[in-house]
Amino acid sequence: MTARRGRTLLVVTVAAVVLVALALALRPTDRPTPVTVGATGRATPTPAPTDGPSVIVPGRPGESAVARPAHEVRDTTAPRYNSLDVWFVRMMIPHHQQALQMAQLAPDRAGSPKVRAVAERIRGAQGPEIGMMRGWLSARGLAADVPGHDHGTMRGMQSPEAIRALTDARGAEFDRLFVRMMADHHDGAVRMATDLLKVGVDQQLNEFANSVATEQAVEIARMRELV
């Protein structure tokens, strides 16, 4: 190899090294924008996902919370309500309505002031609760009625014959029937509410069912002390 050819090879090698170094230095740090080929055959850039606002993600016990991009955080919340929540509300409305029907008989028929006081408490509590349950269904675009369902088969529901007997009774006889029938009716509501607490997911209904189960169980004990 002549000295001239050696110098030429050296120059070419140095130039190649310089070009490679420049290419590495000028290389973009971001990934290339992906493209999408549409129906027309033309390639259009696909927008890269944006991080959006940060979301505070709680850490495990003993760990600190961390901030993560919103698109990386999946929605893991439980459903707001399920079919069993809806069924409970639809059944509890007519159940409460019958309790009101019986309680409304007491002012003119009960012999004991304590029985009249129990009936008044029932009217004061269960009337607004029916409004709450109807509102719960309405807010979700759900109907309150269940066509074709025999509500008389629900726990604690009193037969038409029993309601007629209570309507016809007066004084001590009314008190005795009222306490027996309403205690049985309350017991049915307690069972329905307890069942919902095992399977329902709606927080508002969970609190309501817990209140029904607790308060009506206490009221059963109070009524049974009256006669």
Image (cartoon, rainbow, N blue to C red):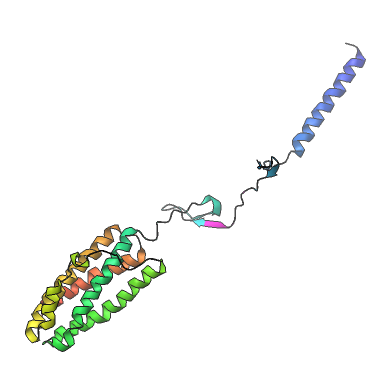
Does residue 211 appear in the picture of this structure?
no
Position of residue 28 in the picture relative to residue 14 (left or right): left
Q: Where is residue 80 in the image (x, y as percent from the top left)?
A: 39, 61
Main SS, magenta region, reads: loop
Which residue is painted at 69% across and 44% down in the image? 44
Q: Is residue 51 magenta?
A: yes
Q: Where is residue 18 in the image (x, y as percent from the top left)?
A: 81, 30
194 in relation to 22, above or below = below
Decide which of 187, 5 is in the foreground and name it.
187
Q: Is residue 187 magenta?
A: no
Q: Position of residue 171 (x, y in %)?
A: 9, 87
Q: Where is residue 8 in the image (x, y as percent from the top left)?
A: 89, 20
Judged from this view, the residue extending furthest toward the top is 1
Which residue is painted at 33% across and 66% down in the image? 205
Which residue is painted at 14% across and 85% down in the image? 114
Decide which of 67, 124 is in the foreground and name it.
124
Does residue 56 appear in the picture of this structure?
yes
Residues rendered magenta in the picture = 48-55
Which residue is painted at 72% across and 41% down in the image? 28
* Quadrant assignment for the N terminus: top right
